[in-house]
């Protein structure tokens, strides 16, 4: 029995001395800690990216219109009825060489009997924008018409007539912008340049 105890004692490492098995286990623990730290950092970065994307998306969704509450009306095909609402004009753009206006549509659909059958809110729309008579004091724009599907119903939106007036003067930014647009229209200027000037006008009006 005494001999067995001596053999067992001799097989144990001296206190404070690391065996190869201990060293291997410590290396494994350190490697596992590195993996956990890397995973935690990656998860944190991914979470921050998701938050930033959500903030940007939210800002874009709640961007205020440049010109809000333009009255717009329309008719419902196949069965009759009407649409009455407003257009929140956001910006002008060049779409394949064509000047267009983008905005959000809000309104109410009513059937031929006068019963409300549905409402829509902030539906994105793109309408053709046709400049009319333009001088340094006044600009006429026609938006639309437009046919679109609202709540499963084909709706024809009538044109929206927009008239912008200003007085040209050395310090009058709106009047100077209108004058620049008028000159471009007279010379058949590119749609992209006209859209840029119109967006500057919207910012002034907003």
Image (cartoon, grey):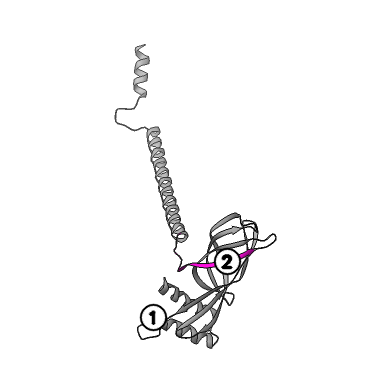
Viewer-side residue, 136 vs 30: 136
Residue 46 lies, with reference to residue 177, above or below; the image says above
**Quadrant of the rendering where the C terminus is positioned:** bottom left
Task: Check disc 2: other Cα within 10 Å, few if <14, some if 14-19, many if 20+.
Answer: some
Indicate which disc residue 73 carries: 2
**Residue 149 position within the rendered picture, expressed as x and y whole percent measured from the top left:** 63, 61
Nearest the eye: 115 or 190 = 115
Residue at x 42%, y 53% (from the top left corner)? 51
Q: Quadrant of the N terminus?
A: top left
* 30 sits to left or right of 135: left
Helix, strand or loop under label 2:
strand
Q: Quadrant of residue 72?
A: bottom right
- The magenta segment is 62-75
| Residue 98 screen position, x and y as percent | 58, 76
Image coordinates of residue 91 in percent, x first then y, are 49, 70
Residue placed farthest to the right in the image? 78
Quote the CA–CA distance across marks 2 and 1: 32 Å
Instruction: Indicate left or right for 203 with 195 as reference.
Output: left
Q: Among all residues in the image, which is located at the extreme top?
A: 1
Which element is circle 1 on? helix
Question: Per the image, is 131 magenta?
Answer: no
- For disc 1, the marked residue is 173
Residue plotted at (40% across, 36% down):
24
Specify whether 38 is left or right of 111: left
Counting from the top left corner in percent of width and height, residue 127 is at 57, 70
Badge 1 density bin: few <14, some 14–19, many ≥20, Cα 10 Å: some
Q: What residue sits 51% from the left and 75% below the top? A: 162
Please, is residue 206 above or below residue 53 in the view?
A: below
Looking at marks 2 and 1 on the same chain, the residue that comes earlier in the sequence is marked by: 2
Q: Is residue 57 left or right of residue 1?
A: right
Magenta stretch holds residue 63:
yes
Quarter of image, res 6:
top left
């Amino acid at each position: 029995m005494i001999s067995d105890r001596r053999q067992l004692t001799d097989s144990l490492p001296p206190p404070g001395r690391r065996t190869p098995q201990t060293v291997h286990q410590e290396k494994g623990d350190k490697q596992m800690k590195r993996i956990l730290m890397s995973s935690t950092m990656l998860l944190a970065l991914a979470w921050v990216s998701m938050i930033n994307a959500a903030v940007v998306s939210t800002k874009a969704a709640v961007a205020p219109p440049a010109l809000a509450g333009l009255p717009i009306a329309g008719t419902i095909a196949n069965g009759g009825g009407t649409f009455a609402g407003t257009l929140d004009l956001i910006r002008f753009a060049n779409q394949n060489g064509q000047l267009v206006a983008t905005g959000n549509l809000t309104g109410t659909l009513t059937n031929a009997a006068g019963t409300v059958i549905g409402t829509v809110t902030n539906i994105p729309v793109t309408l053709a924008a046709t400049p009319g008579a333009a001088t340094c004091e006044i600009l006429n724009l026609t938006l639309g018409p437009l046919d679109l599907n609202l709540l499963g119903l084909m709706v024809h939106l009538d044109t929206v007539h927009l008239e912008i007036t200003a007085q040209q003067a050395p310090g009058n930014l709106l009047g100077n912008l209108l004058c620049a647009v008028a000159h471009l229209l007279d010379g058949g200027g590119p749609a992209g340049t006209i859209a840029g000037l119109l967006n500057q006008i919207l910012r002034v009006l907003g």
